[in-house]
Amino acid sequence: MSILPRTILRSCMATLRHPYSALNVKTPAPLSTICDRSWGRPTAAAAQSDLSGKRLAHILLAQLVILGCWLLSTQQAEALITDESQVQFLYFGHLEYRFENEATANHSFFSLGEQDFFVVAEIAPRLSFLGETVIKPAAQAATGFAPSIERALLRYDYIDNHSITVGKLHTPLNYWNDRYHHGRLFFPTIDRPLGFSSMIPIHTLGLNLHGQNLGRLHFGYDLVMGNGISSSETGKEGTSMSVLASAHFNPIEGSRLQISYYRDSINKDWHGGHTGHSTYQNDINLHLFNISLAYFGKRLEFLNEAGYQRSYSDSTGFEMAQDFTNFVYIGYRFTEISTSYAILDLLEISEKNLGAKRGTPRKIGVGYKREFSPYANIKAQLVQTSPIETTQKKSRSFELQLSYGF
């Protein structure tokens, strides 16, 4: 084979195999390890100094063809990078160890927590998709785990910072549910606040009008209409719709003040959400108010989530139940990777509440978080918990959690 076809073939094959090397761009670690970074460097073979005119013409022509191949591969690589940037796949999960000291026995065990599959896609310049599917522990499943679609929504940015979202979304009732997904990597603590067990409607399937970063105070709003607590995502058990109105402000960097109101009706004890269970067989009217105050600065971290709920049924003569929840988190970042914190978590479900399990659980604890990188951290907590039933005694636990994401 003559020098011209051989040089062209070798250069084109190297370029097609390793387009990122030609672009000199940073690639993910797995791809970096297999890229041939020696491509394009001078070879060890000595060049001939005595060239004929015909041979020199062949080499110059070969270099022009090589340049054309390189430009073509560069355009293909840029298109590939653009396509990849439109769809992003992420994975989050956590492992836990827990030692519990109870009145009758001690328990020590490891557990595998929720494994969160996350996808974000830009479908069109103003249209995007977000999906979140979780494999989580489920006692009734044969393997001990079951899949669950936690979010599946389309968002259209119709003007500036205003958008409309349809699908299954996290109900933007408070700071925690609006900012964190099911991956524990970004949680400031190991667990969610107690209010999520019986008061906070985590998900809504419906429509959300949303705005953010408006004006000097970075005002934002959410107006949501969707399936209520009684409804599931696949059926039509519930007959009423839930509504939510929420407003928040970010007056200084790292801060947020949010006020929300949620209205719903639980129809004949159909519970498609996360609000507990009872045997009451009539409709329950529900009003939920929430205020969140958050500040996450370079050193100090603070979060307070307070909720007040009123519920009643027409069949009980408008006898009203009043429930409360308050979660306080205070953290101090000693270094860029180390944070110590304390938590106080209170929940009070009234004896008159007809749609949730009554009780007054309490949780108080201290913890420490160390970040190995933005993609992994470990948290340790010492917690004392007062159970829902007043006849049970307090328990103490040591919890260790490794969270990761990539």
Image: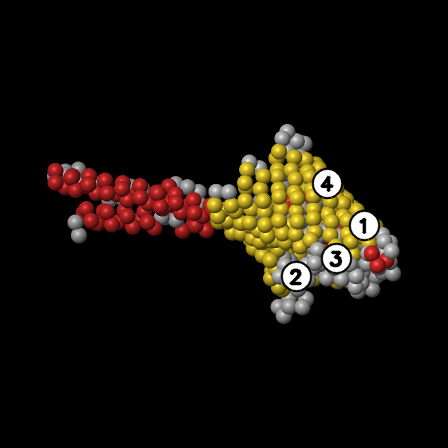
The secondary element bearing badge 1 is classed as strand
Residue in the image at 64% along x and 68% along y? 141
Q: Nearer the viewer, residue 177 or 4?
A: 177
Mark positioned earlier in the residue sequence (4 or 1): 4
Labels 2 and 4 touching (C-beta < 8 A): no
Q: Which residue is mark 3?
A: 266
Q: Which residue is mark 2?
A: 236
Q: Amino acid at mark 3?
A: Ile
Picture mark count: 4
Residue in the image at 77% along x and 49% along y? 287
Mark positioned earlier in the residue sequence (2 or 1): 2
Q: Amino acid at mark 4?
A: Ile
Q: Which residue is mark 1?
A: 310
Q: Residues within 10 Å of mark 2 (few under 14, many from 20)?
A: few
Q: Residues within 10 Å of mark 1 (few under 14, many from 20)?
A: some
Q: Which numbered disc, 2 or 4, marks the residue closer to the eye?
A: 2
Quarter assignment of residue 93: bottom right
Mark positioned earlier in the residue sequence (2 or 4): 2
Q: Residues within 10 Å of mark 4 (few under 14, many from 20)?
A: some
The secondary element bearing badge 3 is classed as strand
Q: Which numbered disc, 4 or 1, marks the residue closer to the eye?
A: 1
Mark positioned earlier in the residue sequence (3 or 1): 3
| Residue 136 placement (x, y as % from top left) | 63, 60
Asked if one can make out residue 218 in the rendered structure from this viewpoint, the answer is yes
